[in-house]
């Protein structure tokens, strides 16, 4: 990875485990763990993701919302994801790596390169699939 491709996040210096420790302390200090049922956290995750979407609503195709607001909402998504993952005992980073490996099999480069089709449509000729790749 070149310096230009270096991601803008600091996870190399601040792993998810460090964030998670801070979240646990934050939640315990407020006695909020009692409210963190998996179903509520799952709903909150969807709400926080919708708040990200809302920032782009009615913008031009390449329009970018306020960086401060987008940063806040992306932070909310990660916080909520971390709370849910901890509550159900799933390592979110391992889950993402596992899913990436599955997606590599579902979307072989030879079939998926330059196509936004869902994996089950990759064997159809280009332009005949309806669904975009998303899961
Ligand atoms: Mg929010």
Image (cartoon, grey):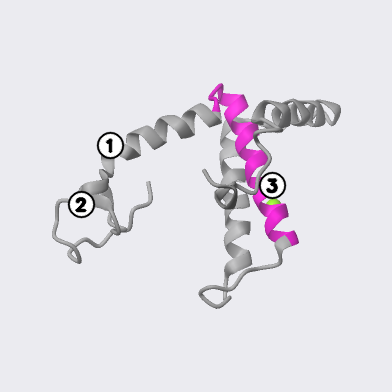
Does the magenta portion include 76?
yes
Q: Is residue 83 above or below residue 55?
A: above
What residue is drawn where x is 75% and y is 60%? 68
Q: Which type of secondary structure does the marked residue at label 3 adopt?
A: helix
Which residue appears farthest toward the top when viewing the image?
Answer: 89
Q: Is residue 82 above or below residue 2?
A: above
Residue picked out by circle 3: 75
Q: Main secondary structure of the magenta part?
A: helix
Q: Is residue 89 left or right of residue 127?
A: right
| Spatial separation of the CA atoms under disc 1 and disc 3 | 30 Å
What residue is drawn where x is 66% and y is 68%? 65
Which disc is residue 76 wearing? Answer: none
Mark sitting earlier along the chain (1/3): 3
* Foreground of the two, 11 or 82: 11
Does the magenta portion include 78?
yes
Q: Are marks 1 and 2 in contact (CB under 8 Å)?
A: no
Q: Position of residue 122 (x, y in %)?
A: 20, 52
Task: Say if disc 2 is inside 8 Å of ligand 1.
Answer: no
| Spatial separation of the CA atoms under disc 1 and disc 2 | 12 Å
Mark sitting earlier along the chain (3/2): 3
Q: Position of residue 72 (x, y in %)?
A: 72, 53
What residue is drawn where x is 57% and y is 70%? 57
Which disc is residue 122 wearing? Answer: 2
Q: Are marks 3 and 2 in contact (CB under 8 Å)?
A: no
Within 10 Å of disc 3 (Cα), the crowding (few <14, some 14-19, many 20+) is few
Residue picked out by circle 1: 105
Within 10 Å of disc 2 (Cα), the crowding (few <14, some 14-19, many 20+) is many
Please state the extent of the stretch shown in magenta in the rendering.
68-91
Residue 19 placement: quadrant: top right
Mark sitting earlier along the chain (1/2): 1
* Foreground of the two, 88 or 62: 62
What residue is drawn where x is 58% and y is 73%? 63
């Amino acid at each position: 990875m070149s310096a230009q491709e270096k991601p803008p996040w600091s996870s190399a210096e601040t792993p998810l485990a460090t964030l998670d420790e801070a979240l646990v302390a934050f939640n315990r200090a407020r006695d909020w763990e009692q409210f963190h049922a998996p179903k509520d956290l799952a709903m909150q995750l969807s709400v926080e993701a919708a708040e990200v979407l809302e920032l782009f609503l009615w913008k031009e195709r390449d329009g970018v919302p306020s960086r401060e607001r987008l940063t806040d909402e992306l932070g909310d998504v990660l916080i909520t994801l971390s709370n849910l993952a901890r509550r159900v005992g799933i390592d979110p980073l391992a889950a993402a790596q596992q899913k990436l490996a599955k997606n590599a099999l579902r979307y072989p480069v030879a079939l998926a390169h330059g196509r936004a089709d869902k994996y089950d449509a990759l064997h159809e000729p280009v332009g005949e699939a309806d669904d975009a790749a998303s899961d």
